[in-house]
């Protein structure tokens, strides 16, 4: 097939530079908006899936399957788990990967001053927590002692304060009690990173619940039959210790349930993506219609020179896709620079906007699709006119 | 300028596809803008600090999740009633199916029905307070928005979050957020959630005699509780309570403000591009108009009028579609037991239309200027 030169399409874009620039700017904004929404959706989805360790089971109270903050179990449960579920739980010498935890959602203030109360998730833990929460590690400082706390890397975002105010050595006011920040922990890609961790017994006393825990998290042996392990835990909770009203849920299943709760929100975000994409398409079609309308005679002349209609359509597609590709590339670079890793405060904690390959693929795909679909209708319309009639067109 | 409208409309309709694409694009973006604006409007009305309210909310200190606030009942009720300036007290147990951000949250309020009916002035679409009062073993009345969202009908059971109630009525209310709640008996809800009977509620709603003294009465209540008990309270005006409960969502909603601003910006670019194309296509025509006596300002006005008409048309379609959709399918976003309605209010519509008009003017200015003050001779040779 006799094709038009590549330079022809490129030159045509600069025939009307202001028009081309405006279209490019519009498309850039549209793709940037798309990537913004996509990064939010992917950030939330990724954090929900990463937060749930597939080898961890949470033992909680019967009524609290969907909201672990509501769970209250006896503080004898960890001892019972270590004794009766030793076969299924990971051990490191004498230490078993069993982490008793106490969860509190509370309003806290910074320093000793309650001017700026903010919402935080506080978790009472023991050092065993690092045996079970494998993605968490101590990044700086020391594990907290009585009267101290450990703050997650995203805790400042969750609380809504300057990260400098959560530096090691600073003081945090939790329910009227000042606590020194002893260290900082990281748990990349999980909601744990937005939490504040206290010594377990210290927190229980402060909350006046010395005989309660919220949950016990256990790490299962990876090499064993998972169904059998879960069956053991289920038997322990429902039958051997039915009096304690316990249930065991794989942590990944818990976060799957949360993902379902967020489904309407995610659908709404995808609806925004669709609306913005369509709006971008309208702009692209508009520009290409204008580009084609003024060149009807030119296309007719090219056809008389021997270029087939398919070549002209391809040239128009080339122009449109080139413009869309430029806008998409610019928008993607801007999004990676400005949005990637930006922490967003959310009800469960905080998470980072995440432009993963899927988000970039969808964003770029929509941007390029706008370029393709924007050119086709005007191109087909212009080339339907007979050559003789087109040569006489004004 | 009005007498030139037929000319303006003729020019727009002369390029139907171009006009249709611009109007469609603007409509989609203004739909989005109206959508986020209606959410912001709902939040603003719920948390407006300038609205003097005679309601205080007594909550457990340092708590924000309803399941973590436990106040002794009826001990604290007696204490609060004796505080000077307090007109009435309503103990409420709050149970939600989901504490986190959700578009489908169901909120139960367990209340002493006889007290609630004195305070809550509902318009019943079906059923009544009497029907609820008679059904102590699981009767409930449901707010209209929640009933529409969940397809709840009177006489049928409704189950969620481990609570099963029989619907005895559906009510409407003028108060923001009230129609997202299910009211049932306090004792029933305490029993269902395994609380020991008559021991705890989530909050106390306090009605004061003088709204100007609300802050002072709030401090007095907290002081009295601190002197008598170890479970401290934090009493706030209702708007302030909602602002705290919704703190995590407020930031997210503020973020959508930028989304709305970018949408308006893209509308401006879309309209500006279209008007530029239209002006560039009619260079000769504008020159001819000038030679027959039309001033540059008149030409500028004509081009600007095209820009405003297109922008306004898109805005009108988008805003109307959004308002219609939100009226047909009311949306509510909730967190920590507090709900924000997406409010398709006249204010949102007018604000959107005003912006669409403004964007039309701004977007069309440069092409209109170029069209109106181009060199006539050069333009005639175009």
Image (cartoon, grey):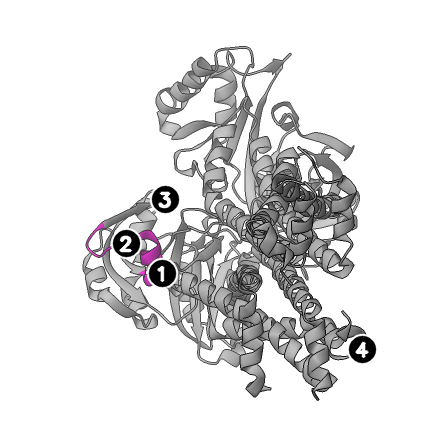
Residues marked 2 and 4, same chain:
yes
Secondary structure of the residue carrying numbered label 1? helix
Residue B172 x, y percent position in the rendering: 32, 67
Q: Is residue B346 left or right of residue A347?
A: left
**Residue B144 belongs to the span the image colors magenta:** yes
Which residue corresponds to mark 4? B377
Distance CA(mark 3)–CA(mark 2): 15 Å
Residues marked 2 and 1, same chain:
yes
Q: Which residues are magenta?
A: B143-156
Disc 1 or 4, which lies upstream in sequence? 1
Which residue corresponds to mark 1? B145
Which residue corresponds to mark 2? B152
In the depicted view, which residue is nearer to us: A363 or A260? A363
Secondary structure of the residue carrying numbered label 2? loop
Nearer the observer, disc 1 or disc 4? 4
Disc 1 or 3, which lies upstream in sequence? 1
The chain that hosts pointer 2 is: B
Q: Is residue A184 left or right of residue B115?
A: right
Disc 2 or 4, which lies upstream in sequence? 2
Residues marked 3 and 2, same chain:
yes
């Amino acid at each position: 097939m006799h094709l038009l030169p590549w330079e022809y399409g490129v030159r045509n874009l600069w025939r009307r530079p202001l028009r081309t620039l405006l279209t490019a700017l519009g498309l850039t904004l549209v793709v940037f908006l798309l990537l913004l929404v996509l990064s939010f959706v992917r950030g939330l989805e990724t954090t929900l899936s990463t937060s749930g360790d597939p080898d961890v089971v949470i033992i909680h109270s019967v009524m609290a399957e969907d909201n672990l903050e509501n769970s209250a179990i006896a503080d004898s449960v960890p001892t019972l788990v270590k004794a009766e579920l030793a076969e299924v739980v990971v051990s490191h010498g004498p230490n078993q990967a069993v982490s008793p935890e106490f969860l509190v959602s509370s309003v806290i203030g910074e320093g000793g001053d309650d001017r700026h109360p903010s919402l935080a998730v506080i978790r009472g833990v023991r050092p065993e927590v690092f045996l079970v929460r494998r993605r968490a590690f101590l990044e700086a400082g020391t594990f907290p002692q009585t009267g101290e706390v450990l703050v997650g890397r995203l805790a400042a975002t969750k609380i809504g304060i300057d990260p400098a105010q959560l530096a090691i050595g600073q003081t945090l006011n939790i329910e009227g009690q000042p606590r020194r920040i002893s260290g900082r922990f990281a748990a990349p890609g999980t909601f744990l990173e937005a939490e504040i961790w206290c010594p377990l017994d210290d927190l229980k006393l402060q909350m006046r619940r010395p005989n309660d825990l919220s949950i016990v998290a256990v790490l299962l042996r990876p090499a064993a039959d998972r169904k059998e392990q879960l069956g053991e835990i289920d038997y322990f909770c429902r039958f051997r210790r039915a009096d304690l009203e316990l249930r065991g849920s794989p942590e990944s299943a818990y976060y799957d349930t949360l993902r379902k709760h967020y489904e309407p929100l995610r659908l709404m975000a995808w609806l925004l993506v669709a609306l913005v994409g369509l709006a971008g398409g309208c702009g692209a079609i508009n520009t290409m219609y204008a580009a084609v309308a003024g060149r009807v005679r030119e296309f007719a002349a090219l056809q008389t020179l021997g270029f087939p209609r398919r070549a002209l359509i391809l040239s128009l597609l080339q122009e449109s896709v080139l413009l869309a590709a430029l806008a998409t590339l610019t928008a993607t670079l801007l999004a990676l620079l400005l949005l990637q890793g930006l922490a967003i405060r959310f009800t469960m904690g905080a998470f980072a906007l995440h432009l993963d390959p899927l988000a970039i693929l969808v964003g770029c795909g929509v941007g390029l699709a706008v370029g393709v679909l924007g050119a086709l209708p005007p191109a087909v319309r212009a080339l339907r006119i007979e050559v003789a009639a087109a040569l006489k067109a004004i | 300028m009005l007498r030139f409208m037929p000319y303006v409309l003729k020019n727009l309709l002369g390029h139907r596809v171009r006009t249709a694409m611009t109007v469609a694009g603007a409509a989609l973006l203004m739909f989005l803008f109206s959508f986020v604006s209606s959410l912001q409007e709902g939040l603003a009305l719920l948390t407006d600090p300038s609205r003097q309210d005679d309601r205080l909310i007594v909550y457990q200190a340092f708590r924000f999740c309803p399941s973590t606030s436990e106040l002794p009942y009826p001990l604290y009720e007696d204490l609060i009633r004796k505080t000077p300036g307090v007109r009435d007290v309503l103990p409420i147990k709050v149970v939600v199916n989901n504490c986190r951000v959700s578009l489908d949250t169901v909120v139960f309020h367990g209340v002493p029905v006889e007290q609630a009916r004195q305070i809550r002035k509902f318009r019943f679409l079906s059923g009544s307070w009497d029907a609820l009062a008679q059904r102590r073993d699981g009767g409930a009345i449901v707010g209209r928005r929640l009933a529409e969202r969940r397809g709840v009908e009177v006489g049928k059971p409704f189950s969620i979050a481990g609570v099963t109630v029989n619907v005895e009525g559906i009510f409407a209310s003028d108060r923001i957020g009230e129609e997202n709640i299910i009211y049932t008996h306090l004792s029933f809800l305490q029993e269902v959630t395994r609380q020991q009977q008559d021991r705890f509620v989530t909050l106390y709603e306090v009605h004061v005699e003088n709204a100007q003294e609300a802050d002072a009465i709030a401090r007095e209540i907290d002081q009295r509780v601190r002197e008598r008990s170890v479970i401290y309270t934090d009493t706030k005006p209702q708007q302030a309570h909602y602002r705290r409960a919704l703190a995590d969502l407020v930031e997210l909603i503020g973020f959508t403000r930028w989304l709305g601003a970018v949408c308006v910006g893209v509308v401006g670019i879309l309209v500006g591009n279209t008007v530029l194309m239209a002006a560039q296509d009619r260079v000769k025509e504008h020159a001819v108009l000038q030679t027959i006596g039309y001033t540059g300002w008149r030409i500028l006005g004509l081009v600007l009028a095209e820009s405003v008409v297109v922008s306004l048309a898109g805005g009108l379609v988008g805003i109307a579609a959004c308002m219609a959709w939100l009226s047909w399918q009311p949306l509510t976003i909730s967190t920590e037991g507090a709900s924000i309605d997406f409010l398709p209010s006249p204010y949102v519509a007018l604000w959107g239309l005003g912006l669409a008009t403004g964007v039309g003017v701004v977007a069309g200015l440069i092409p209109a200027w170029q069209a109106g003050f181009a060199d006539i001779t050069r333009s005639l040779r175009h």
